[in-house]
Amino acid sequence: MSASQPDPIRPIPALLSLVVPLYNEIEVLAELHARCVAALEPLCGFEMICVDDGSSDGTRQALRDLAAADSRVRGVLLSRNFGHQAALTAGLEAADGAVIVTMDADLQDPPELIGELLEEWRRGGEIVSATRRSRAGESRIKLATASGFYGAFGRLSGIDLSEQTGDYRLYDRRALEALSSMHERSRFLRGMSAWIGFDQRAIEFDREPRFAGETKFTPRRMIRFSFDAISSFSHLPLQLATLLGFVFSILAFLAIPIAIGLKLAGQFVPGITTVLLAVLLLGGIQLITVGIIGEYLGRVYDEVKARPLYIVSELTDRQ
């Protein structure tokens, strides 16, 4: 039996694009830039694409100043807050590198890990994800809800997605082009990255506490994000609505002959309260199922309108 062939070693890329979405990160920006530059300079040529997602705390002006001082920094300033996934998409579409890395700005995902991602790419990986071995500074409630969401997502969508994998990952240019061919508005880039396939690999790391500021993912945004993810990759909620309709319709039809039989037998059938409860129950189920259907129809309406995913108000020029 012949020995397995080692992975091919790709040459160091001429240009690596680092994409970082920003939203009210004035406290982090200087440290983020310093650490990213220190991590990337020994590796290869790079550009740092910072996408300001409608910040209101001075981040936009600080980004302009940073781009003027460092020609490797490119600012993409969106006209308003379009959301984290839209900002990531804007950065990916602006990237020119043969290798593209996405990461959040809060420095919980250390830039020093980019070298390991790049080495795994050189050994043949086309999408390399950073998987969290530990998650310092995150509450038990957040960890429990994340575990529940990813478990439900996997069962409903059939896509195996680790709960410890976020948006810190490296894309080969070929993989990014495949990802960019998906034009849906309700974007869940983690699921989309897993769905396109290619040679996917992962490295482990210990996630650090947030460097400064507060998380921008409020419970409301997390719920919206979770629903976007599940509804974008699974039709099971619609199928469950249909199944519920059949189950309760059958129960209602079975109850009719029973009620007629009791009436013919001279048995009094009490139950104004029971009837009202049944009506309310069935009405509630109908409203739930109509709401689910309406959510999907709303997404179809959004796609038909074909509005742009984001609008750029300003690009900092290359120096």
Image: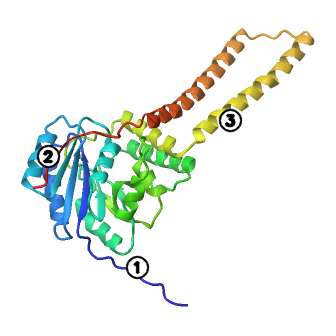
Residue at 28% x, 50% y is 91
Residue at 23% x, 63% y is 112
The Cα–Cα distance between marks 3 and 2, rounded to whole angstroms, is: 52 Å
Q: Quadrant of residue 43?
A: bottom left
Q: Is residue 10 above or below residue 302?
A: below
- Mark 3 crowd level (few <14, some 14–19, many ≥20, 10 Å Cα): few
How many numbered marks, from 0 up? 3
Residue type at numbered disc 2 = Leu
Residue type at numbered disc 3 = Leu
Q: Which residue is the extreme one toward the left?
A: 69
Quarter of the image that includes the C terminus = bottom left
Labelled disc at residue 63 = 2
Label 3 element class = helix
Q: Which residue is mark 3?
A: 243
Q: Quadrant of residue 117?
A: bottom left
Q: Earlier in the sequence, mark 2 or mark 1?
A: 1
- Left or right of 65 in this view: 202: right
Quarter of the image that includes the N terminus = bottom right
- Left or right of 160 in this view: 122: left
Given contact means CB atoms under 8 Å apart, are the residues at marks 2 and 1 in contact? no
Closest to the observer, 53 or 148: 53
The Cα–Cα distance between marks 3 and 1, rounded to whole angstroms, is: 49 Å
Q: Could you say where residue 98 lies in the image, as x and y percent from the top left?
A: 29, 65
The Cα–Cα distance between marks 2 and 1, rounded to whole angstroms, is: 40 Å
Residue at 49% x, 88% y is 3
Q: Which residue is mark 1?
A: 7
Q: Is residue 292 above or below residue 148?
A: above
- Left or right of 81 in this view: 7: right
